[in-house]
Image (spheres, rainbow, N blue to C red):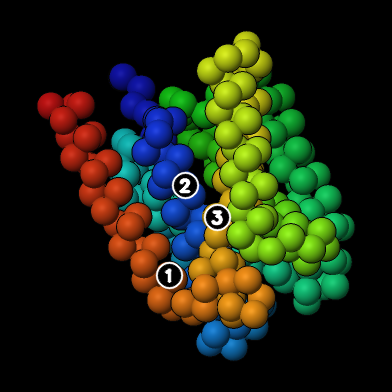
Amino acid sequence: MKNINKVAEITLIFWLMKIIATTLGETLGDFLSMTLNLGYAVGIGITAAFFFTVLLIQLYSKKYIPVFYWLVIIATTTLGTEISDFMDRSLNLGYTLGSIVLFACLALTLFLWYKKFKSLSVFPIFERQKEVFYWIAILFSNSLGTAFGDYLSDVVGLSYLNGALVTASIILIVVLLHYFTKINQIVLFWIAFIFTRPFGATFGDFLTKPIAKGGLDLGTLNASIVSIMLIGILIFVSHKRLKTKTA
């Protein structure tokens, strides 16, 4: 029986969608916990239920289907926001310790993944057990990105726009390393994946926070609607490209 890939190929459109998904995760997570005033614990419950629902659909799909895959990505970014905020604020761990704990969880996941499969390759993925490691690593990396984005703004004292510029610069350096060095591509992927999360998080804060705090004051609902429309268009494009490729 032929193995069929289950995850997205790493292309330019992948990174564009990842950034928009992380922005949506930040604004939607804040909409649930703060705008609706549900609190972080309730927000985690709602987003965790959504995450496990779409994850099961993705895991039991027979092939890569863009809409299912990106719904799980969006779920990890939203749940990651809630997890990070719950650790940092409700548990009073603070952004520094919260980031360290989440980094340790991500490192442990990648270590166990490598120990099991002797590789951290993220495309293609056929085995369901490897895909589970893949999604756990993505969840922790998105949670870490949220905590690190908040660390830049609240601990380092950068404005939301400056925080986005710092993380964007790191991503640009990773891109240059990808094209002009022989550094392991899997290592560069995970660095880029982690830092696209704080970029999306800080950009989401830039869209939603008050003007007095360096934001555009669009509000979490309006910013979430804009992000949903953008990623919806890109998911449609991904389906069209996949049909063309497999035709």
Q: Amino acid at mark 3?
A: Gly
What distance separates the C-alpha of mark 1 from that of mark 2?
15 Å
Q: Residue at x 64, y 63 (%)?
A: 160
**Where does residue 137 sit, x and y in percent of width and height?**
63, 42
Q: Residue at x 71, y 24 (%)?
A: 115
Q: Nearer the viewer, residue 170 or 145?
A: 170
Q: Amino acid at mark 2?
A: Lys
Q: Amino acid at mark 1?
A: Ser
Sequence order check: which comes first, mark 3 or mark 1? 3
Q: Nearer the viewer, residue 232 or 38?
A: 232
Q: Residue furthest top?
A: 182
Give the structural element (helix, strand or loop) at label 1: helix
- Residue 137 visible in the snapshot: no
Give the structural element (helix, strand or loop) at label 3: helix
Question: What residue would you read off at disc 1?
Answer: 224
The answer to whether marks 3 and 2 mark residues whose Cβ atoms lie closer than 8 Å is: yes
Question: What residue would you read off at disc 2?
Answer: 18
Q: Classify the position of the C terminus by image quarter.
A: top left
Question: What residue would you read off at disc 3?
Answer: 200
What distance separates the C-alpha of mark 3 from that of mark 2?
8 Å
Number of numbered markers: 3
Q: Residue furthest left?
A: 247
Numbered mark located on residue 10 in the image: none
